[in-house]
Amino acid sequence: MAIISYLNTVRLDQGAIGSLAEDIAILGIKKPLIVSDAGIKHAGHVDKVIANLPGGLAYSVFLETPPNPTEAAVHAALAQYRTEGCDGLIGLGGGSSIDLAKGVAVLSAHPAPLQQYAAVMGGQARITDRTAPVIAIPTSAGTGSEVGRGAVITFADGRKLGILSPHVVPKRAICDPELTVTASPQQTAAFGMDALVHCIECFVSPVENPVAEAIAIDGFARAIANLPRAVRDGADREARRQMMVVALMGAMSFQKGCGAVHALAHPLGGLSKTELHHGTLSSILLPHVLRFNAGEALVLPKYRRLLDVAGAGEADDIAEFMRRFSVEIGMPQRLSDIGVSRDLLPRIAALAPLDHTHATNPRRAAEADYLDMLEAAF
């Protein structure tokens, strides 16, 4: 039986930030905590949000979001949320800011510790509709956290875990392509590969959900056509808009679950000594996971479908096609290129089977398989 559900309300358009006051009124928020970071503030986006708040509305701003949201950052933002008497959140930025806002929303109405709400801890059943309302405003086209049912948090023990629940989905999302034009070509490429990998992994997931599968393959097609355009010309508004759609579609496809790319990228991204961008990690790992999954016969027709949609040649190979695509948009190709040391690989391979995305990879992977993939990507 396939159980299919899609939630929340999304405003997608150039200048959609102008609708923020209406969304705040709809949700009845009297004092929001704006969760963002210093880079987003420097780009002028925090000021744009403040300018579009209802006149006279009180607010508070938290700018200490780390590149990979942490349990400690959630507690710091939660303390400010409570001290300032806030009753809702605006997650402004990439997936990190939005996921951090989601973590605060959960703990604003549920007892600590946060880790008890992780999917691998059976936490979904513990999260209720008392979760504080979140308005998500992405400034990048990547994670799709603005429509995602999860928040990925790095915990004090180094594990990067997903907090999953329908009650974690932001109540409203404002997707304004104008907010993404300040991203550099390198950032645009990394964000876009994040969304593209979501579409691929969800498409090949063995979970039955034809609606999510159709969304995933359409998102893949849009990314192949538009990500190189957005990287080449950041002022290409239509390419930027299409990539925001890809990010939405990737996250809407999460109902099918991701796979081994994410099972590896999550613990890699949880490394405390190195800040590793999730989209960059996903891009590097993707060809190696695709090659591993080719050992599962049921995915081969889906690989062929991806190649057909991409307009690839009959004799092409999806892993090699995606490797060439990532080279075209300037992505790093090796884990060693981004500062990962080989001595960490066994630890990552041991953690990968514990990630919630491991269960929906189309081919069963053991710790030794994960280590082989990591070595190939190194």
Image (tube, rainbow, N blue to C red):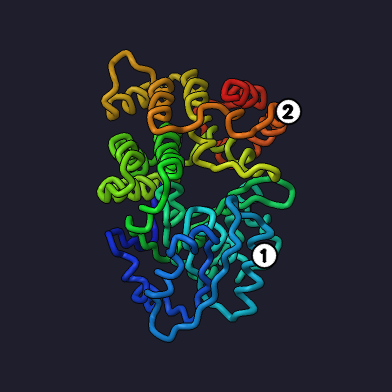
With respect to residue 310, does 189 lie above or below? below
Q: Is the Cβ of the residue at disc 2 closer than 8 Å to that at disc 1?
A: no
Q: Tell me how far mark 2 sits from mark 1, CA to CA.
A: 32 Å
In the rendered view, does 158 fall on the left or right side of 360? right
Q: Nearer the viewer, mark 2 or mark 1?
A: 2
Viewer-closest of 296 and 139: 139
Residue at the image point whose x is 50% and y is 75% from the top? 32
Amino acid type at image mark 2: Asp
- Judged left or right of residue 185, residue 89 is right
Residue 9 in percent (x, y) is at 35, 63
Identify which residue is drawn at 60% across, 62% down.
64
Work out whether 176 lies above or below 292. Answer: below
Determine the secondary structure under disc 1.
helix
Q: Which residue is mark 2?
A: 343
**Horizontal and vertical percent position of residue 246:** 35, 45
Provide the secondary structure element on which disc 2 rests: helix
Numbered label attached to residue 218: none
Q: In the depicted view, which residue is nearer to us: 365 or 135?
A: 135
The answer to which of 291 and 70 lies nearer the viewer is 70
Vertical side of 29 occupied by 250: above or below: above
Give the residue displayed 47% in from the left and 62% down from the top. Answer: 92
Q: Name the residue that disc number 1 marks.
A: 75
Task: Give the residue at the far top of this rendering.
Answer: 315
Tell me the crowding category of disc 1: few under 14, some 14 to 19, or many 20 or more residues within 10 angstroms, Cα based: some
Q: Position of residue 211 (x, y in %)?
A: 33, 44
What residue appears at the point 28 percent right and 45 percent down from the top-left corner? 239
Residue type at numbered disc 1: His
In the rendered view, does 332 fall on the left or right side of 79?
left
